[in-house]
Image: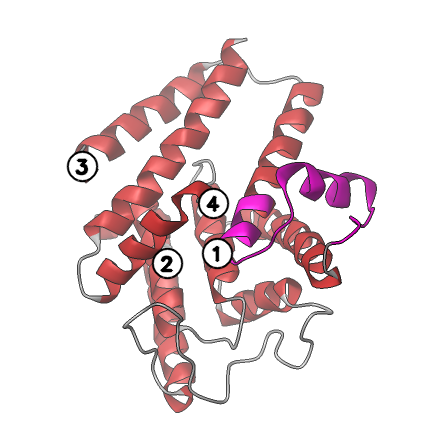
Amino acid sequence: MELKALLAKIDAKRAELDRQRPLSAAEAARLREYLDVEWTYNSNAIEGSTLTRQETLVVLKHGLTVGGKPLVEHLEAINHHAAIGWVEQLAARLAPPGEADILALHRLVLRSIDDASAGVYRQGQVYIAGSAHVPPPSRAVPGRMAEFAAWLARTGEDQGVDQGLHPVVRAAHTHFWLVDIHPFVDGNGRTARLLMNLLLLQSGYPIAIIRQEDRAAYYAALEAAHEGRLDPFLLLVAEAVECTLDIFLAATAE
């Protein structure tokens, strides 16, 4: 499906969701728990975590460690869940996120894993395994991030409508731009996906969960975007938003 047609379909489903009865508090809590686990599991699995969905649930809901799994994977799950809470707080604020917000988000992602690098722009060159894209040198990162934050602020006025930028497209561009700069030593992908979903929530859209099963397609779409072909990545994000919309619609239908 072409991007324009998919965005129209998403907006129709969002309008339908707005017309449906609201979920009860208990139903909303169960759905939130499900999505939090899915979001955390998939985002960390894309980066190589071996925790399963059920193990992720055990870590998040019961605070237990899973035998045989590295401590860092438990910390990644706990940190990501804390970052989701921070994203929800920022989404309620409605103001476009700035550099300080992005740094705070990254600080949560790497908390107790690499405190020296958490919330700090990298000081050296980094390379992305399996990608031909070479991120900018570290000396260019502050300027690139300032430019990025200015774009977020500008397009955040009326959620990008005045610029003719669909909120889902704006969120996908945000994800790609951060990964393209690769401002951190580690945690760039997780931070980018959290930031993308922050913008979606602020715009009244459900989160986009990039699933571990789609990791190859996700990386291929990012690689195409680095080469200047953004449509595959925009389409992949839009499909993820539609998938979450379908989950909400199924829940309200019952």
Which secondary structure, mark 4? Answer: helix
Density class for disc 1 (Cα within 10 Å; few <14, some 14-19, many ≥20) is many
Q: In the rendered view, would you say 127 is above or below 25?
A: below
Task: Work out whether residue 218 or residue 156 is closer to the camera in this orientation and state it.
Answer: 218
Left or right of 3 on screen, residue 72: right
- Earlier residue among tags 2 and 4: 2
Q: Position of residue 48 (x, y in %)?
A: 54, 57
Mark 2 touching mark 1, by CB under 8 A? yes
Q: Position of residue 187 (x, y in %)?
A: 54, 66
Q: In the rendered view, would you say 71 is above or below 244?
A: below
Q: CA distance from mark 2 to mark 3?
A: 19 Å
The stretch of residues the image draws in magenta is: 41-68
Q: Amino acid at mark 3?
A: Lys
Query: Which residue is label 3 attached to?
Result: 4
Query: Which residue is label 1 attached to?
Result: 195
- Earlier residue among tags 2 and 1: 2
